[in-house]
Amino acid sequence: MKKTTSKKQTQSKKTSAEAKIAELHDRLNRSLADYQNLEKRIESQKQVFLTFSLMSIFDKLLSSIDDFYLVNSHLNDKGLKMALDKLESVLKSEGLEEIDALQKTFDPHTMDCVDTTDKAKKDIVYSVSKKGYKFNGTVVRPAQVIVGTKI
């Protein structure tokens, strides 16, 4: 009788140990999945932070760049033009892109209408007062445009 009881107890302990191992294995897999999700979330948050930081820097630089373009339009200096082209090239390589607005249909998501004119067709951008820019598809600064009203 002792052998039968002993076998049952051994089998019961074995079953209990296997259940515990399965439970621990499941908890380990869940913990690993949670950790991987945390890593992904942290990486995503870092990218968002980096994007907003760069957008803030770009926004501050753009007003100075506008001033340099204004100075260059009066001086027409080749050296200043080369420096501006190089600066634009660097900003473009970092993901900043100019919003192409001239002769396009007015888009309130990427453009601000600062004036209207009857010299162009309705809702077509006649001229750009101030360039607009996007960074990774997000508008850093909308283009300030003059829009046609002619029907």
Image (cartoon, grey):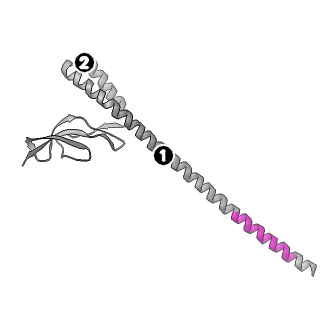
Amino acid at pointer 2: Lys
Q: Magenta part of the protein: which range?
A: 7-23
- At horizontal 59% and vertical 52% (from top left) the residue drawn is 35
Q: Is residue 126 positioned above or below 89 on the image? A: below
Q: Residue furthest right?
A: 2
Q: List x then y, in percent, for residue 62.
A: 31, 31
Question: Badge 2: how crowded within 10 Å, few (<14), some, or many (20+)?
Answer: few
Which numbered marker is on residue 78? 2
Q: List x then y, in percent, for residue 39.
A: 55, 48
- At horizontal 42% and vertical 37% (from top left) the residue drawn is 53
Q: List x then y, in percent, for residue 63.
A: 29, 30
Count of residue discs = 2
Which numbered marker is on residue 45? 1
In the shown orientation, is residue 9 left or right of residue 93? right
For the stretch drawn in magenta, the main secondary structure is helix
Position of the N terminus, as image quadrant, is bottom right
Amino acid at pointer 1: Gln
Instruction: Give the secondary structure at mark 2.
Output: helix
In the shown orientation, is residue 10 left or right of residue 75? right
* Inter-mark Cα distance, 1 to 2: 43 Å
